């Protein structure tokens, strides 16, 4: 049995060129257990659907796995249909967060889909390959959705992997590592190649707009030693320009996070630029001290709103004073800060959006990113919008665009929202103070580059 995993083409140019970690983990796990596997990151190679089909067809796989996230759900379905027509003998399986919540709808709408995988894909994919190879019953494979005589069968849930250290490192050798970058002006150089390290899975918080906690339920962490070993392997095999931890919340557990910082210092990995996600109100002085010692260069924070009612409404479990003190404490240690904000959430008014823009200015962040909200399947926001018929456009392009409106607002017109979005950028990213910061960071980065050369 031969497996071919595909990250589908994208209809949008707004998605960050980062490696598909989930597919790379599945590929490594399946390969470790004796199966032939290939992988194609069509999105980040800039391939269209015809080119992708040609590449997959040349491998003549028995099973094709397609990753589906909300920003590529239409593209994934289009690719799957084309592959079904080009390779009628191959089985098609879809997986990913979008599929986890909408598998029934997707399979009912597209009869050519043979299987869907819910939850983590490593063990389910391996067991599916084994069953197809042996011709055995599929009903005992947890996490699998399949068909029998045209009827959908949803197998029992698969328990989460208890020990993530048992998984092999992602199969980066099957990916175009040269194609990945993550450009942050004044933090990374244009030629910096990014390596992503996924150290945890899940988040225990239940923010209204996020589906992660409803997919993963809790957070599980790899051992610090296992994470450090992966960094070491990457440093030996690739030209690492920077390390990015894309975890929902890398710094949730203080003791674990401090051990990670200590290990990075001991092994000399503090020579790399690195960035991660933090959470306002969860960053102790001791943890920030160790992050500074380990030369963490950038911490990203989901701030969302400058209005306490909206923070409470989306169940953020933080306060405006928590946010202010966390940002100030991070900046005091010389660590760059990036804040993510939402403009145009349900129940918003022009006044609340203005408050968020003002708050973003007052925090003196190094980087401020503004997004119009997206109703991700599985999130309470998605259910809220469906119940009230608020969804305007759920195309791939809209899910991928930070500036396109998806949710209708009662108190703010589309024209007002567009004006306020432009105002947010003008007051932060394109303000005189913002431009001055960019210039200063550029000069510091040039000096650092000159010293290294």
Image (cartoon, rainbow, N blue to C red):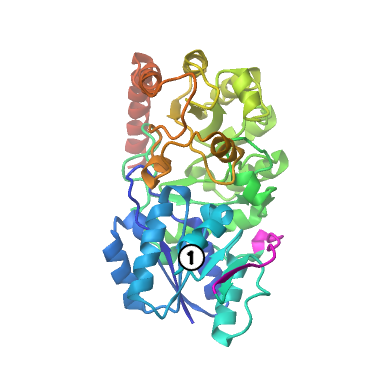
State whether residue 254 is above or below residue 121.
above
Residue 356 on the magenta segment: no
- Quarter occupied by residue 435: top left
In this view of the protein, which residue sits in the foreground, 201 or 388? Answer: 388
State the residue at coordinates (65%, 61%). 165
Residue 164 on the magenta segment: yes
* SS at circle 1: loop
The answer to whether one can see residue 416 in this image is: yes
Left or right, 12 with reference to 152: left
State the residue at coordinates (69%, 48%). 217
The answer to whether one can see residue 178 in this image is: no
- Which part of the image, by quadrant, shows the C terminus? top left
Residue 105 placed where, x, y %? 53, 56
State whether residue 227 is above or below residue 245.
below
Left or right, 340 with reference to 144: left
- Judge the density around disc 1: few (<14), some (14-19), many (≥20) Cα neighbours within 10 Å: some
Q: Start and end of the magenta stretch?
A: 150-165
> What residue did someone put label 1 on?
171
State whether residue 112 is above or below residue 278.
below
State whether residue 268 is above or below residue 278.
below
State the residue at coordinates (44%, 35%). 406
In this view of the protein, which residue sits in the foreground, 31 or 262? Answer: 31
State the residue at coordinates (27%, 64%). 50
């Amino acid at each position: 049995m031969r497996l071919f995993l595909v990250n589908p083409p994208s209809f949008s140019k707004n998605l960050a060129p980062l490696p598909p970690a989930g597919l790379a983990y599945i590929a490594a796990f399946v390969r470790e257990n004796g199966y032939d596997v290939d992988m194609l990151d069509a999105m980040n190679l800039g391939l269209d659907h015809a080119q992708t089909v040609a590449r997959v067809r040349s491998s003549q796989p028995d099973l094709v796995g397609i990753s589906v996230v909300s920003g590529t759900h239409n593209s994934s379905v289009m690719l799957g249909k084309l592959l079904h027509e080009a390779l009628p003998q191959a089985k098609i399986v879809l997986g990913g967060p979008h599929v986890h919540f909408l598998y029934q709808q997707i399979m009912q709408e597209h009869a050519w889909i043979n299987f869907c995988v819910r939850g983590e894909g490593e063990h389910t994919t391996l067991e599916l390959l084994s069953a197809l190879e042996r011709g055995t019953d599929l009903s005992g494979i947890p996490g699998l959705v399949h068909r029998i005589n045209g009827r959908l069968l949803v197998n029992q849930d698969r328990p989460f992997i208890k020990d993530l250290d048992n998984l092999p490192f992602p199969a980066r050798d099957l990916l175009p590592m040269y194609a990945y970058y993550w450009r942050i002006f004044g933090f990374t150089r244009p030629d910096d190649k990014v390596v992503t390290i996924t150290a945890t899975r899940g988040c225990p918080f239940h923010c209204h707009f996020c589906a992660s906690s409803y997919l993963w339920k809790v957070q599980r962490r790899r051992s610090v030693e296992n994470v450090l070993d992966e960094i070491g392997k990457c440093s030996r095999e690739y030209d690492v320009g920077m390390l990015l931890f894309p975890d929902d919340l890398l710094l949730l557990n203080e003791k674990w996070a401090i051990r990670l910082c200590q290990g990075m210092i001991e092994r000399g990995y503090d020579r790399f630029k690195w960035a991660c996600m933090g959470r306002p109100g969860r960053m102790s002085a001791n943890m920030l001290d160790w992050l500074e010692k380990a030369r963490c260069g950038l911490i990203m924070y989901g701030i969302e709103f400058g209005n306490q009612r909206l923070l409470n409404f989306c169940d953020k479990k933080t306060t405006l004073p928590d946010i202010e003190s966390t940002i100030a404490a991070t900046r005091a240690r010389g660590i760059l800060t990036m804040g993510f904000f939402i403009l145009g959430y349900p129940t918003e008014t022009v006044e609340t959006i203005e408050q968020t823009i003002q708050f973003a200015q007052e925090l003196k962040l190094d980087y401020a990113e503004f997004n119009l909200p997206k109703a991700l399947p599985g999130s309470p926001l998605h259910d809220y919008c469906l119940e009230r018929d608020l969804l305007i456009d759920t195309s791939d392009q809209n899910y991928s665009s930070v500036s396109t409106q998806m949710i209708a607002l009662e108190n703010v017109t589309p024209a007002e929202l567009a004006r306020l979005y432009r105002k947010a950028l003008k007051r932060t990213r394109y303000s005189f103070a913002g431009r001055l910061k960019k210039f200063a960071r550029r000069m510091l980065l040039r000096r650092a580059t000159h010293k290294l050369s």
